[in-house]
Amino acid sequence: MLDVRLYLLQRISALIMAPLVIGHIAVMIYAVQGGLSAAEILGRTQGSLWWMLFYGLFVIAVSVHAAIGLRVVVHEWLGLKGIALRLFTSFVFVVLLALGLRAVMAVTAG
Amino acid sequence: MAERIEERDTDILIIGSGGAGLFAALHAQQTAQPGTRITLAVKGLVGKCGCTRMVQGGYNVALGNGDTVERHFMDTIEGGKWLPDQDMAWRLCEQAVVRIHELENEVGCFFDRNNDGSLHQKAFAGQTADRTVHKGDLTGIEIINRLMEQVLSRPVETLQEYRAVGLIPTADGTALSGVLFIDMRNGRFVFVRAKAVLMATGGGPTMYKYHTPSGDKSMDGLAMALRVGLPLRDMEMVQFHPTGLLAGEHTRMTGTVLEEGLRGAGGWLLNGAEQRFMFDYDEKGERATRDIVSRAIYSEMRAGNTTPYGGVYIAMSHLGEAEVRKKFKGMVKRCADCGFDLAGGLVEVVPTAHYLMGGVVVDVDTRTALDGLYVAGEDAGGAHGSNRLGGNGVANSTVYGGIAGEVMASDIKGVTSFRDPDRSILQQEYERATAAFTGNSNAEVSVSELRYQLQEVMWDGVGVLRTAESMHSALDSLTDLQRQLLEVQVPDDNRAFNLTWHDWLNMQSLCEISEVIAKAGLARENSRGAHFREDFPEVGDLDASYFTVATKHADGVAVERQPVTFSIVRPGETILPEGEPATLVG
Amino acid sequence: MNTSNTSASLNVSVWRGTSDGGEFRSYQVPVQSNQTVLDVVTWIQQRIDNTLSYRFACRVGMCGSCAMTVNGEPRWTCRTHVNNVTENATLEIAPLRNLPVIKDLTTNMDPFFDKWIKAGGVHEPSALRNDPMVPVNPESKARKVASEGVECINCAVCYSACDTVAANPDYLGPAALQRAWTLVNDVKHNGKNTVLSAVSESGGCHNCHSHGSCTRYCPVELNPMKAVAGLKKSTVLSLLRS
Amino acid sequence: MIKPGRSNPLWLAFVLHRLSGVVLALFLPLHFYVLSLALTSPAALDNFLAFSDLFVVKVAETLLVLLLAVHLFGGLRLMAMEWLPWTDRQKSLAAASVALGAGVACMFFLKVI
Ligand SMILES: Cc1cc2nc3c(=O)[nH]c(=O)nc-3n(C[C@H](O)[C@H](O)[C@H](O)COP(=O)(O)OP(=O)(O)OC[C@H]3O[C@@H](n4cnc5c(N)ncnc54)[C@H](O)[C@@H]3O)c2cc1C
Ligand code: HEM
Ligand code: SF4
Ligand code: F3S
Ligand code: FES
């Protein structure tokens, strides 16, 4: 159930995420050495516009990407189609975007 | 009979989806008045059955570089040993030029190119110019796939797995009303009335033990034409391809063509003792023409110099295994898939029935003696005479199929009503087709067993070499086979996709036409092209050439001889300008 | 009849039924030296159970009528030697997947061809029969790409092999898309954009997940997966350009 | 009946990619929720981080990172196949990307423990 636009959005979002994910994993590998604490995370990220952009972009991309991805899976494996499928896609997108942006705000705002 | 025959109407009805059927549908659709209903009914799937799809070598057409329509025409006439209908042959050669442009430009075929971008052409045996256009050695697939797309994407109704079983004339017998079909998928009968009907079921000499045509072909068209009283010409002319694969009777691969190019490239034919023998028969050795090589192989076989399965070997490895593998990739793979090593080993081969030159008598516009019935392609007789040049078969079916489409479209302009069928003939044809179910359940033999017997009878009696005696004895056997066939009972619990029923119907058609072939063979008391009488080995007087015409009357099939009209050129003459070289092939 | 080597036999189970349901039935078929799967099926119909339905035409791998599922894999049966597929002298023969069954081993191939046309798989002329032929350099890149996919015999083996077709009935499938790709690369074709937009719709090329089963099973060794990838790229480029 | 193509390395790569994608998509809201705790109650976040020090949790997290790596490299492989001139070596490419994904995860795992 993909047309060229959804396909393109999914691939673009994937390409955007690729460096971000690599970056994120790298930071995590570095960060977890010696254990994680809230203060440590927040100390690094809070008040940083760069981190806000970094994670903000990731959240937008991943919401688009996962919504389209799940749409395909749900169509192919559960047979959802038509309006239900469209609603499902939008729902996933909105939920991920809302939760994601809230988390970004939580760790970077301030 | 209790069963109701469903009835429907269409304006133009085309039977068969080979080169002739598909081109007819395309041209009818392009030229008929808007709103004309066009229906294509076919025994298999559209474009996936019939022999045009199996064309390997290519398509003959004169496209310059010294070659001319005149030269193509002369090759065709001389190849046909002065028997072709010259007007038909001329139109074939002339229109092929248009048709190939159409195939390339409008239909979208991918023919092989030279490096300068022009079409690549090669020379088949018996040609005096590089004339054969091709797409590798899969030319037919390219032509048919592209045509199929054109037809499937246009408003043409398709009736797939619809088998024509009878041509139904009007009560006065002068015109065709429609065609009786079996919808094979559910086994029901459908009578389709039409203002014009093209029969393009492609002949196909599959009554021989070894044969090349596709499995759906069983002479249904010619048998239907015969029953409705139409004359069939040149029916003794069955072309044998010298090298069919020989792999045992239990496999459908047996009989399928190993391409001509193998011999052309220098392949050897070896007898059972693994010795070359072709030079004992002809100075050109393996490179001699199809009919000569076929007869030579047959003679070796009759002398008992055979391989385990009873044929001869083809050997290629002396040309270098790697080289053969490269040059004949498709053939090598085909053999390998079936367990044979063509490049490095020996493969058993045997002459195999390939093409029927004979067919319904038609005019150059594909019209027949029956109003409303048109015939084109391998079903039509006349264009090839006693021998068909390699590459002229697909040219013939596409040229005349296209013509039929246009002629039908123009002939039905202004026709507003359908013709009423002769109900008694409709009923008769229905009963004939269902006789399979009413046989004697105690009959010992099966349909397939009878088919094997028929193939044996025709191979032995009316095959590569013939005598009056062999053909008479074949005729006796045929009578007996037909009687046995009527005794067989096909189970009637489910008529949907009932292959055994269709095998039975195939046998009916094959037996009817086998009889005609044998009788026409008896009527020709000389040897021309594909027809070789051991009791009359001479070619005969070319100036007094005659062709045979078989017609079914109340008391059976009768064959008469009619003189060939040399409307364009007489034996010994040529229409090539003076000083033209005999051949352009180096 | 020449029935050499008939001592051994094969256990063949053949699917019998229609779209409404069916079952496997077992037959014993004698082993022969040169025997294809089509020959096995033929043997059963001619000598054991003459109610069996199947389809074939050319018997040499040109018409693509005879494809069936053999021991779980889609194949052209006229060119499949029994030795290459039997496991422990056992053969399981079923109709092709992803197409409606008519009876026993025959399927209705209409959806396959409908999609072929829907994908834009028809040549649109740029010249007519009275025009000269366009010279085409056989070595040009576009011609080579187009030629790669042109020898398809439309057997639907790839269509049957593709799990995406199974999961998403609207998906046009590998063969139709491959045909579309040859047309996109055919210099003589006038409707390049029509094709690109036809394959960009919701059942189009973008649904392919590159399973590669099409390429793996294609009996004539074409590479539909590559063709579909080509379409994905071209459609995106043409979308970005517009 | 065996489904055709399921023994195909590319099909396995696809399943791996799909499953990893789905699991990631299910995990993501959870991850976001945990991070949001930073906004509402930093203590809860700390609690959670302490919890995540447990070995089992470590293994689970490692698994997720592994999945992310698998999905990432699988996705890149796929896009390479779709967009870059396609070579017949793509099957080995598929295998290599999975191996690479596993490698990254192992590295992570080693450093963690
Ligand atoms: C292996 C092989 C290789 C060949 N190679 C060449 C070559 O290189 N060059 C060349 O010029 N010629 C070649 N020929 C000959 C060429 O294929 C034929 O001359 C030509 O294609 C015949 O075309 P057609 O349209 O008349 O018949 P076909 O293409 O045979 O089509 C006949 C159609 O009629 C249908 N039909 C039959 N009976 C019925 C029925 N009862 N009801 C409904 N439909 C029916 C069939 O299913 C089929 O669709 C070759 C032939 C074979 C067998
Ligand atoms: C890190 C970078 C990522 C890349 C390069 C990437 C790439 C891709 C690609 C190319 C596809 C299409 C697969 C196909 O059509 O077969 C895809 C599908 C998918 N992705 Fe991602 N992805 C990434 C991250 C993520 C993340 C973080 C998630 C989860 C939230 C995710 C969830 C999905 C899902 C659910 C699918 C659908 C799977 C399918 O269709 O089989 N992806 N991804
Ligand atoms: S691409 Fe190959 S498998 Fe698919 S239909 Fe064409 S020939 Fe058959
Ligand atoms: S098998 Fe199907 S998913 Fe794509 S690569 Fe081939 S079409
Ligand atoms: S019968 Fe034609 S491909 Fe097998």
Image (cartoon, coloured by chain):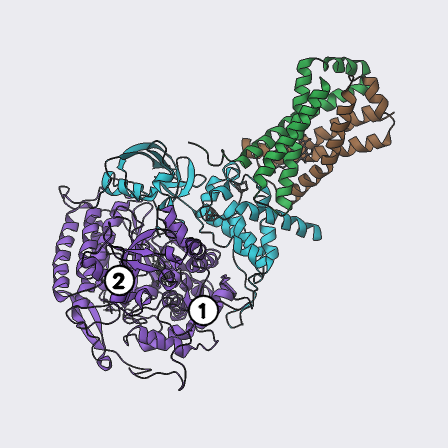
Chain colours: A brown, B purple, C cyan, D green
Q: Position of residue C118 (x, y in %)?
A: 53, 50
Look at mark 2 in the image and give the residue it sits on: B277
Which amino acid type is shown beneath numbered disc 1? Arg
SS at badge 1: helix
Q: Is B506 situated above or below B124? A: above
Q: Nearer the viewer, residue D89 or C195?
A: D89
Residue B378 badge: none
Can marks 1 and 2 be said to lie on one chain? yes
Residue assigned mark 1 = B99
| Sequence order check, earlier mark of 1 and 2 | 1
- Outermost residue on the bottom side: it is B578
Rate crowding at label 2 as few (under 14), some (14 to 19) or many (20 or more) other CA atoms within 10 Å.
some
* Residue B437 visible: yes
Query: How far apart are the alpha carbons under marks 1 and 2?
Result: 41 Å
**SS for callout 2:** loop
How many circles with numbers are drawn on the protein? 2
In the drawing, does residue D19 fall left or right of residue C50?
Answer: right
Q: Is residue A105 left or right of residue B71?
A: right
**Are the residues flagged by discs 1 and 2 in contact, CB closer than 8 Å?**
no
Residue B225 in sight here: no
- Find residue B58 and report its image quarter: bottom left
Q: Amino acid at mark 2?
A: Phe
Label 1 vs label 2, nearer the camera: 2
Q: Chain of mark 2?
A: B
Q: Chain of mark 1?
A: B
Measured as percent of width and height from the top left, residue B349 is found at 29, 55
Query: Measured from the top left, where is residue B292 in percent x and y?
Result: 27, 67
Q: Quadrant of residue B244?
A: bottom left
